[in-house]
């Protein structure tokens, strides 16, 4: 699950397009070249938005200061874009995303086991994911029943039900995300790992907000 | 017929490197142990010792070379030093031998991978199926075929039954086999896979699923060398309705390193292995000591119940000790099993069998005073066995000295024989005071454990297997 800067990876936008083509709901977003295009994209998406630096070399965006959350208007977007210009030193593009609202964060992904080949992971996501290590695994290919069983296997499974005024999570969509990842892992042996983290639950619906696709 | 049939049911066996000698410590040499085990366990086919220095061994004529043997040879046991094994295998190939068990050590496990590769190449070219190298061998208990160098062969006669035991490690596997037999486990097969240059755990599982004598599988693995084949074999076992119980070492980094050096194979990620078990219906135990007792539970309960459709989720607990009743209820909850309160009618029925201060809701504490009734205990157990809201029964025996121990042994044995649902026992009392009664449970094939948790875990595994089999049938029906 740990990514290193030197890894060969898809940029975040390409990663999400690929995931979307396998049925993973992804955040509404636009990859743009400059500030003017970012303002136009934010207008289309609607505030608040997230502005990120985007490029295959930026695999640890938060640590590099390349993520600006919850931008509420044109002025704050301009200010964020100015900071990104300095941080990115002329490399890469900008990614304007809808600011997805949801307190529950999960993760989903694939990795490759030396003996059993591609493995799908589902678990508690967010920034503490590795410390909490609450995940369920399955060896590809996954059936829909396998995927549903994974949801019930994590310790934090009560978060998938109705919880503190939040509705029960759409389990069918979650299961389809996991079986989609399984198909993707089998179709694309050149992909060594995928991290979708966070997979935010917006209302009842899971949405991939950040994604990393690592290539051979 | 399965391609490994010749290995499991040979008509003739050659022992290349047969001996009569002992080592300086007095233990038999490998070539001696191999001959002794074959002969003393009563292999019915021809045995051909091969050793240029001997003319006769264990009452059989000894030849100098494999080529000198009169008559065909199905299987060769090879016990010569590692550097002589490739030539020995070539001799076997020329003779038309169809399977070889190479017991000699000194191959990949000792870093000599090139030698092992050469051995494998010779076997493949000749169409010989290879067990090992670095294997303690193979036993088919129902055909008295003990092709092993393990000292477990000193236990005579072997206890045969329905458990097929596949281990990578020969020394630990042989120890477990012997302890298992002491504990009443009956075996159909024992295979030690060794370095798996050709045949691996998946091949043995795949082949033995077809053997009607092998009813339950116990696997002790250090690594899985061919994951797709292993998964396919596990699925085949599930389709055949045969439980596969597995313990895999290598959970710790240290364990993984020692596994790699031991058999020359890589140990995989433990979490992925556990996930694969859940996915494909293998029952994984995380304590090696649970492996054979759980296999025994499936074998014994399977003699009178169809475990493929069995449930064991709703448990009735019966004991004369209120203390252990509470412990058992805790363990059930921890294991995800239920201890449902009995219906009012059932409670009223049981109330008539037990002392007035007994507790009859479930757990059922019949109290120590139950001994004053000749039939109260048995009637109580029968009542919960008859209850449609109960899937399984856990009986816990605490302090029971003879002759009370024999009462329990005899009556629980009889209740178990007539039971149409799983009944297991935890015997917590001192065994030295139950020297007649305690063994009666084993004789009656009642799964019996010394800890409360082990008894509960056994029921959990039975429930898990039944659930898995129902899911499988649903998928096939869908």
Image (cartoon, coloured by chain):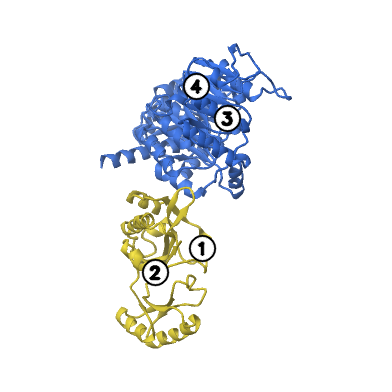
For marks 2 and 1 on the same chain, the one whose residue lies earlier in the sequence: 1
The chain holding disc 3 is: B
Disc 4/disc 3 C-alpha distance (Å): 31 Å
Question: Residues under labels 2 and 1: Cα distance?
Answer: 18 Å
Along the line of sight, the residue nearer the viewer: A31 or B467: A31
Q: Is residue B372 above or below residue B133?
A: above
The residue labelled by disc 3 is B87
Task: Answer with mark 4 or mark 3, whichever residue precedes in sequence.
Answer: 3
Q: Are marks 3 and 1 on the same chain?
A: no
Task: Quadrant for the N terminus of chain B, please.
Answer: top left
Q: In the rendered structure, are the residues bearing label 3 and label 2 in contact, judged by CB atoms less than 8 Å apart?
A: no
Q: Quadrant of the C terminus of chain B?
A: top left
* Residue closer to the observer: A136 or A2: A2
Task: Output the letter for the chain in blue.
Answer: B
Q: x, y (%) of residue A69?
A: 43, 77
Label 1 belongs to which residue?
Answer: A2
Q: Secondary structure at mark 4?
A: helix
Give the residue number, with chain letter if any, for mark 4. B141
């Amino acid at each position: 699950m740990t990514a290193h800067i030197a890894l060969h990876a898809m940029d975040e936008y390409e990663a999400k397009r690929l995931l979307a083509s396998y049925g993973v709901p992804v955040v509404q977003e636009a990859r743009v070249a400059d500030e003017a295009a970012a303002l136009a994209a934010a207008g289309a998406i609607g505030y608040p938005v997230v502005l990120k630096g985007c490029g295959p070399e930026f695999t640890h965006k938060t640590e590099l200061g390349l993520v600006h959350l919850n931008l509420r208007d044109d002025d704050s977007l301009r200010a964020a874009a100015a900071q990104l210009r300095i941080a990115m030193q002329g490399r890469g593009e900008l990614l304007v995303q809808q600011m997805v609202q949801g307190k529950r964060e999960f993760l989903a992904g694939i990795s490759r086991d030396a003996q059993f080949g591609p493995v799908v992971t589902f678990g508690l996501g967010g920034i503490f994911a590795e410390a909490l290590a609450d995940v369920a695994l399955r060896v590809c290919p996954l059936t829909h029943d396998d995927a549903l069983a994974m949801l019930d296997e994590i310790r934090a499974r009560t978060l998938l039900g109705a919880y503190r005024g939040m509705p029960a999570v759409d389990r069918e969509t979650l299961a389809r995300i996991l079986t989609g990842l399984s198909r993707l892992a089998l179709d694309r042996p050149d992909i060594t790992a995928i991290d979708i983290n966070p997979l935010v639950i917006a209302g009842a619906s899971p949405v991939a907000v950040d994604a990393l696709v690592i290539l051979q | 017929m399965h391609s490994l049939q010749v290995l499991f049911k040979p008509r003739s066996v050659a022992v290349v490197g047969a001996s009569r000698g002992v080592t300086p410590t007095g233990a038999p040499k490998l070539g001696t142990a191999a001959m002794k085990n074959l002969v003393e366990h009563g292999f019915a086919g021809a045995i051909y010792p091969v050793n240029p220095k001997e003319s006769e061994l264990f009452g059989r004529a000894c030849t100098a070379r494999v080529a000198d043997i009169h008559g065909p040879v199905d299987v060769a046991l090879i016990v010569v030093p590692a550097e002589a094994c490739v030539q020995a295998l070539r001799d076997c190939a020329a003779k038309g031998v169809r399977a070889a068990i190479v017991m000699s050590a000194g191959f990949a496990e000792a870093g000599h991978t090139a030698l092992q590769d050469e051995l494998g190449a010779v076997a493949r070219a000749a169409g010989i199926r290879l067990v090992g190298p670095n294997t303690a061998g193979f036993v088919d208990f129902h055909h008295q075929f003990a092709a092993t160098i393990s000292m477990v062969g000193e236990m005579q006669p072997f206890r045969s039954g329905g458990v097929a035991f596949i281990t990578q490690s020969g020394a630990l596997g042989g120890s477990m086999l012997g302890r298992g037999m002491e504990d009443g486990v009956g075996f159909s097969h024992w295979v030690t896979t060794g370095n798996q240059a050709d045949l691996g755990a998946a091949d043995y599982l795949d082949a033995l699923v077809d053997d009607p004598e092998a009813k339950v599988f116990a696997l002790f693995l250090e690594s899985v060398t061919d994951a797709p084949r292993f998964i396919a074999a596990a699925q085949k076992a599930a389709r055949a309705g045969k439980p596969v119980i597995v313990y895999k070492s290598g959970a710790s980094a240290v364990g993984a390193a020692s596994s790699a050096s031991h058999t020359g194979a890589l140990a995989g990620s433990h979490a992925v292995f556990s996930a694969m078990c859940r996915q494909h219906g293998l029952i994984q135990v995380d304590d090696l000591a649970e492996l054979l007792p759980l296999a025994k539970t499936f074998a014994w309960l399977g003699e009178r119940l169809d475990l493929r459709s069995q449930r064991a989720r709703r448990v009735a607990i019966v004991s004369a000790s209120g203390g252990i009743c509470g412990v058992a209820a805790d363990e059930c909850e921890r294991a995800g099993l239920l201890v449902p309160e009995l219906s009012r009618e059932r409670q009223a029925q049981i109330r008539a069998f037990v002392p007035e201060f007994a507790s009859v809701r479930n757990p059922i504490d019949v109290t120590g005073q139950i001994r004053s009734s000749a039939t109260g205990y048995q009637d109580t157990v029968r009542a919960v066995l008859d209850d449609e809201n109960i899937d399984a029964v856990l009986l816990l025996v605490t302090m029971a000295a003879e002759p009370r121990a024999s009462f329990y042994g005899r009556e629980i044995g009889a209740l178990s024989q007539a039971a149409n649902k799983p009944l297991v026992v935890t015997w917590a009392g001192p065994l030295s005071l139950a020297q007649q009664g305690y063994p009666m449970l084993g004789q009656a094939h009642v799964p019996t454990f010394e800890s409360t948790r082990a008894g509960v875990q056994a029921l959990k595994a039975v429930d898990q297997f039944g659930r898995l089999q129902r899911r499988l049938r649903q998928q096939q029906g869908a």
